[in-house]
Image: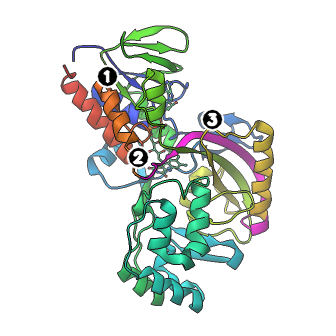
Amino acid sequence: MSGRAFVLGGGVSGIAAGLASGLQVLEAQEHPGGICRSYYVDEHGARHDRRPADRPAWRFETGGGHWIFGDDPPVLGLLARHARLRRHRRRAAVFLPDRGLLVPYPLQHHLRLLDSGTAAAALHELLRPKRPAATLAEWLEEQFGPTLCRLFFRPFHDLYTAGLTEEIAPQDPHKSPLDPRLVVRGALGEVEDVGYNVTFAYPEEGLDVLVDRLAARVRLERGRRVRGIDVAGRTVELADGSRRPWDVLISTLPLDRTLELAGLSTGEPPDPATSVLVANIGAVRGPACPDVHWLYVPRSQAGFHRIGFYSKVDPGFLPRPDPALVSLYVERAFPRGARPDAAAIRRWLDDVADELRGLGFVREVLVAAADWIDTAYTWRRPGSRWREEAMDLLVRHRIFPVGRYARWHFQGILESVREGLAAGAALRAGLPA
Ligand SMILES: Cc1cc2nc3c(=O)[nH]c(=O)nc-3n(C[C@H](O)[C@H](O)[C@H](O)COP(=O)(O)OP(=O)(O)OC[C@H]3O[C@@H](n4cnc5c(N)ncnc54)[C@H](O)[C@@H]3O)c2cc1C
């Protein structure tokens, strides 16, 4: 390949792009993987980037449990050549704390578990013809009806979107599947699992091992934060003040951040994004600890909307095999960038621990760590063209947005890897003139 080109960001999209293109990858952090990164906390609470050889440690993930869902045989095959993957069958539920009820996900396919009055009203509303909806709030009401919206969908989405339900367009309908046939059958008896993550894979030795092995095959420059992109002079400026000339860039950074770095604007304000604060907890199991991989929660005192149980997926997350222990993650959404200070995060971890103890999910918290994901979920204002215009603008300047945040659309690890591979291979085939 002729010409100078770089990949910006060494998360899974950037690693894949670097792998397929042979290009240098500039990564701000000392470790590759971005959000897809495990880390370890030993029994004294000290944090380690890799599993310590000399002491037991809990394995956690910066973005909460990162499970590899989807079925793309070549991409899965590539991952499986680097680390042994184990396949799991999803056990997910909706948790209704005020009713003390755990209903398998998706709630709308399991109405038989609700009281008969609620189930009858929900059934009637779910089967009504649907009208178009402009906002997520309208769409939820239209799809699932007022009864299930009051019970679950509205308060859950208010937490999950950090209060944006009335301001953003409906998106990701695959996360809330609605099959009228299964609604009716599920009101009477058991139904089959549906959805995008019925089964998922996870590396036996941890996500960190998979990511490190992939990254070892890439020309990765660690600790290289890009602080500016000069589109006229075609140089990238790094945090240490040095400059790299370029002809083409693949950017895996969030779309709005790439525009900012390049000093470009579509003339429209960017669409919103939200951040997530993750609490990673190692604990003694409580008497009511549910036997699921994750729970969707519509109401919680500590403001979280999801609890995942690492060690229910794989006991390898624990410091030692011990059925009395459990490890879990809790996610709370925030408006983008509204990061609480360290003292507030410590108080929040205490609140989460109290709530989990109160629910009987844990008996005693042994270790707790928090992680902030600044760009976690991306959204669109109804009718917004910002995403398409922003991507077109970058491409006109020979900056190609690739991956989950760069293209501002929901996708998991597998699709991010696939996109990175495709973009890298396209560049390898020839830099655009
Ligand atoms: C809470 C949460 C849970 C999720 N759970 C799952 C799941 O279970 N399964 C699943 O498949 N997917 C899941 N995802 C989605 C998954 O995280 C993404 O698809 C994937 O991580 C996207 O990878 P990426 O490389 O595109 O982005 P990132 O991981 O964000 O990587 C971007 C990289 O760019 C680097 N960077 C940023 N700024 C600069 C700069 N100025 N200069 C240089 N480098 C920079 C960052 O350090 C980072 O390494 C989840 C996402 C979230 C938020």
Q: Position of residue 7 (x, y in %)?
A: 38, 25
Whole-number angstrom distance, CA of label 1 to CA of label 2: 22 Å
At x 80%, y 59%, the residue is 354
Which residue is label 1 attached to?
397
Q: Position of residue 215 (x, y in %)?
A: 42, 30
Question: Residue 348 — which label?
Answer: none
Whole-number angstrom distance, CA of label 3 to CA of label 2: 51 Å
Q: Position of residue 295 (x, y in %)?
A: 59, 65
Q: Amino acid at mark 1?
A: His
Q: Where are the magenta residues, as a range?
A: 358-382
Sequence-earlier tag: 3 or 1: 3
Which residue is label 3 attached to?
53
Disc 1 beta carbon < 8 A from ligand 1?
A: no
At x 37%, y 79%, the residue is 129
Whole-number angstrom distance, CA of label 3 to CA of label 1: 47 Å
Which residue is label 2 attached to?
384
At x 55%, y 15%, the residue is 239
Front disc: 3 or 2: 2
Front disc: 1 or 2: 2
Image quadrant assignment for residue 230: top left
